Image: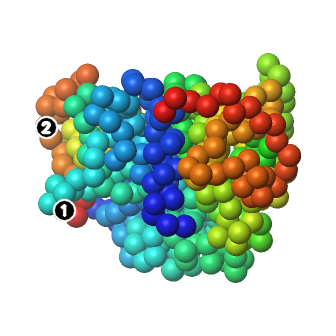
Amino acid sequence: MTADVKTSIAARASQELQPGEIVNLGIGIPNLIPGLLGDDMNVFLQTENGLLGVGPRPGENERDPDLIDAAKQPVTALPGAAYFDSAQSFAMIRGGHVDVAVLGALQVSISGDIANWAVPGKDVLGVGGAMDLVVGARRVIVTMTATSSKGEPKVVAECTYPLTARSAADVVITELSVFRLRDGALVLTELLGDATVDDVRAVTGGPFDIDLEDRRAA
Amino acid sequence: MSIASGPIEPAEALSAIRSGDTVMVGGFGLVGAPLTLIDALVDSSEADELTIVSNNIGEPGRGLGKLLRQGRIKRGVSSYFTSNPEAVAAVNAGEIEATLVPQGTFAEAIRAAGAGIAGFFTPVGAGTLLAEGKEERVIGGVPHVLEEPIRADVALVYAARSDELGNLWYRRTARNFNPLMATAARVTIAEVGEIVPTGELDPESIHTPHLYVDQLVLSR
């Protein structure tokens, strides 16, 4: 996967955010979003290790050892930021006070099930806040490439990887398309770049409805 | 309890930990982890067969990763063992048992233990591997999982500042699990960066009131 592909997915995902929203970003593609937001977007980034109002990465000499994000990377705090403990942080998340979670996934099923924390046959020893976020955030936006590094579809009929949560994805954005969950099933609503419906079908592991009239004026 | 006298030596404080105990350790990774107390546990305590409740089992050779290398951890309760590949290897080799808990459930279960709550239903984890063996109940049409409190014999927490009574003030994202763990153990030992005279902390800004804290130790 080239950096351009990742950036294009992040750029499309950034268009889903509304000014003033509270947003939690996962590692990987979602973490590219802050650099792509316009100055007038004014979203508030929440990180589950206890900060609302995450600012840009600090310079080499401006790092504070007590100030990191959930990826354990140094961050800054913006004016108006608030710190809190982990129970309050996840109360915000589970309680529906975080508007949007943007996260990566290994598989998403046609019915919106998400698998993003474990690979079968490997260690299932790290879940972090993934389950809390996909269950609790009001909108869940999945950003991922259309296929795995082995070329296998990541939008599938049924998840074969361990589930994070059922019917949790509201929007799925790949380099080819945008799917939205409607009445319990993913619907193809937008083609990205030069992609055709056949291109999307070729890398999708199950049947899906198409409603391209929903295309956004981006 | 509250602090009867001033700070004590780490080794003396850790004499509260016995073999087979459950020990909570604050921190998100190494940020907010009581590193002086962990080092003392590694160097001066002989307690083994420990159950460690901590979001991570340190990093390789750092923080709780040192205790892991000594083979003194029997079981880990954590949301993210993966940050220490040596912990993952120890689990896969059958050297330690692992209980994996979603991070929000982990935090809330510790809070519940400290608050006298016998359990709670959460939608998080329902229908997944992490709900296996747990009671599930549909509430309001949504599947929930019954989670029980997580408590400990001893909690090791870190705060940037305390007063002489043991009121604690945490700094930035070093707060994380520390205030929760301070409430959820029989004995709470707080490692602090500095101790200011009682009365100097703004009462409106105290994160952990001193009644939760049994011993103070200064960071080295």
Residue at point 22% right, 31% down? A79
Residue at point 48% right, 48% down? A10
Residues at circles 1 and 2 in contact by the CB criterion of under 8 Å? no
Check disc 1 and report the residue beneath it. A60
> Which residue is nearer to you in this view: A205 or B90?
A205
Q: How far apart are the alpha carbons under marks 1 and 2?
A: 35 Å
Q: Residues within 10 Å of mark 2 (few under 14, many from 20)?
A: few
Residue A48 pos. (x, y %): 47, 42
Q: Identify residue type, mark 1.
A: Glu
Residue A22 pos. (x, y %): 44, 29
Q: Secondary structure at mark 1?
A: helix
Check disc 2 and report the residue beneath it. B197
Residue A173 pos. (x, y %): 61, 45
Q: Quadrant of residue A61?
A: bottom left
Q: Secondary structure at mark 2?
A: loop
Residue at point 80% right, 31% down? A184
> Which residue is nearer to you in this view: A22 or A206?
A206
Q: Taking A171 as reference, is B103 above or below it?
A: below
